[in-house]
């Protein structure tokens, strides 16, 4: 696994786009560490177990050749031209992620797949912003369909007529990276059946007992605003609860074109005021403090390496409260049941998840060594580059309980806590939290932030570590 050490500078976003994604936009598994000077690299390299590693200045761009990342020697002004042309002419027939309806009068979302159509059955007004000219044409063509149309045939003919080279069917709501598109088109009947079968599966899942004609007819009675633009150009006019930003924080296009450089436009007004007030440490005289530091011997490197092996398990977490926030359970009802127990209709026992036992054995053993009674949820919490968690609190009575442990905490990521200020997190830092206090987290960096949060009877850890 190659690690890139990048010296911070004015071209961070372009460098990030070239090393965190391949030339066609698929995320890579390599890691990036931003440094202020290359003097930091020697100490970091040993702790990160990086062999080999690549040092690069801000503005260095890399291309993939024969499976290796090679420093690009050509004209940097046109480095992303092929990718930009491809992505602005790509068709997503279906979505590669689960549909989660926005329960609001109006909604803002990207145009990929059919989520915009589903959303028109939940909202009176939907705004679609998409950078793909082909996707916009696809949406407008669907709105012109007559009743009882064969949708699979429509899609096939749309691709052939418009000579679309780059397209994704995304059956079963999963990215079809390794599908031979040309081979698919050679079998018209097979292609049509694949699309129609997938459409029926989605209808059965999201609109049981309703036909495509009915869903489309309902959508046509609503207000739809379609524009070829980046979704970040429109977010100022919407509340976060009205937005579905999809994978935009992990979208290569937005980094190589500097379409997102700050989270400010997305933060709630309450969050902005809170940050302004609690940007510095403030002493309080509370009987129960907002947090207490713990002295834990955290095997940060081992846990981090295991998180990287298990990061494909991350699922979106509380999308109405932030963006770029995801999680998976090491211990809980299931690896993808990351919310509080009351959120789910059918309760399950809390156990070490099979996925964590397989992929994170050293982490599990270390957590067991803490000897926490009545262990409940133990989660890896990820915050994407430029992601944030809006102002919220997790309990209504004042008490110390959950333990928050930083595994990574990049420079530029801030945790603001009511009645305290900014928490001094660094890898291995642990706090017992009193989450009756409001808090918010802003990751204004180009690195993922990984924390582990432990719920259970944690008082024994407190007594042995302060």
Image (spheres, helix red, strand yellow):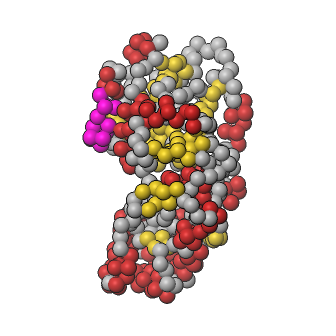
Q: Position of residue 290 (x, y in %)?
A: 57, 21
Q: Position of residue 453 (x, y in %)?
A: 44, 31
Rendered residue at 62%/65% (across/down): 75
Q: Position of residue 142 (x, y in %)?
A: 52, 79
Which sits in the foreground, 315 or 363? 363
Q: How many marks?
A: 0
Which sits in the foreground, 200 or 427? 427
Res 340 seen here: no
Res 52 seen here: yes
**Going by the picture, which residue comes out furthest to the front?**
73
In this rendering, would 145 be left or right of 313?
Answer: right
In this rendering, would 87 be left or right of 340?
Answer: right
The overriding secondary structure of the stretch rendered in magenta is helix
What segment carries the magenta color? 355-365
Q: Position of residue 29 (x, y in %)?
A: 42, 50
Residue 178 to residue 396: above or below: below
Which sits in the foreground, 406 or 210? 406
Residue 192 to residue 353: above or below: below
Rendered residue at 62%/52% (across/down): 59
In this rendering, would 205 be left or right of 272?
Answer: left
Rendered residue at 41%/44% (across/down): 52
In this rendering, would 344 be left or right of 91?
Answer: left
Rendered residue at 65%/64% (across/down): 77
Q: Is residue 184 magenta?
A: no
Residue 135 to residue 295: above or below: below
In which quadrant of the rendered view does residue 232 lie? bottom right
């Amino acid at each position: 696994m190659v690690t890139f050490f990048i010296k911070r500078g004015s071209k961070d976003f372009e460098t990030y786009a070239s090393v965190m994604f391949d030339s066609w936009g698929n995320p890579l598994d390599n890691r990036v560490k931003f440094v202020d000077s290359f003097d930091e690299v020697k100490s970091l390299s040993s702790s990160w177990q990086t062999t080999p590693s690549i040092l690069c200045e801000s503005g260095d761009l890399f291309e993939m050749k024969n499976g290796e990342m090679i420093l690009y020697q050509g004209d940097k002004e046109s480095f992303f031209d092929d990718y930009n042309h491809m992505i602005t002419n790509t068709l997503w027939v279906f979505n590669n992620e689960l549909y989660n309806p926005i329960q609001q009068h109006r909604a803002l979302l990207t145009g990929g797949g059919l989520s915009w159509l589903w959303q028109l059955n939940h909202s009176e007004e939907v705004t679609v912003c998409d950078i793909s000219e082909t996707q916009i044409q696809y949406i407008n063509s669907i709105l012109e369909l007559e009743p009882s149309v064969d949708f699979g045939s429509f899609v096939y003919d749309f691709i052939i007529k418009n000579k679309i080279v780059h397209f994704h069917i995304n059956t079963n709501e999963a990215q079809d990276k390794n599908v031979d598109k040309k081979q698919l088109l050679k079998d018209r009947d097979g292609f049509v059946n694949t699309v129609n079968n997938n459409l029926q599966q989605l209808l059965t899942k999201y609109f049981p007992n309703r036909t495509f004609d009915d869903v489309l007819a309902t959508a046509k009675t609503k207000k739809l605003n379609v524009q070829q633009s980046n979704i970040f150009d429109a977010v100022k006019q919407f509340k976060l609860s009205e937005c579905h930003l999809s994978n935009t924080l992990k979208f290569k296009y937005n980094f190589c074109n500097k379409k997102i450089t700050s989270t400010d436009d997305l933060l709630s007004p309450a969050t902005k005021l809170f940050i302004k007030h609690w940007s510095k440490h403030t002493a309080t005289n509370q009987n129960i403090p907002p947090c207490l530091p713990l002295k834990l011997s955290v095997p940060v490197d081992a846990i981090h390496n295991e998180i990287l092996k298990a990061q494909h398990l991350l699922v979106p977490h509380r999308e109405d409260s932030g963006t770029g926030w995801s999680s998976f359970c090491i211990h809980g009802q299931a690896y993808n049941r990351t919310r509080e127990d009351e959120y789910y209709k059918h309760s399950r026992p809390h156990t070490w998840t099979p996925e964590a036992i397989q992929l994170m054995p050293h982490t599990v053993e270390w957590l067991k060594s803490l000897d926490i009674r009545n262990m409940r949820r133990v989660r890896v919490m990820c915050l994407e580059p430029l992601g944030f968690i809006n102002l919220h609190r997790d309990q209504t009575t004042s008490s110390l309980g959950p333990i928050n442990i930083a595994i990574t905490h990049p420079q530029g990521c801030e945790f603001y806590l009511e009645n305290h200020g900014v928490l001094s997190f660094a890898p291995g830092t642990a706090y017992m939290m009193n989450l009756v206090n409001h808090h918010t987290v802003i990751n204004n960096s180009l690195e993922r932030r990984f924390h582990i949060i432990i719920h259970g009877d944690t008082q024994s850890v407190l007594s042995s570590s302060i």
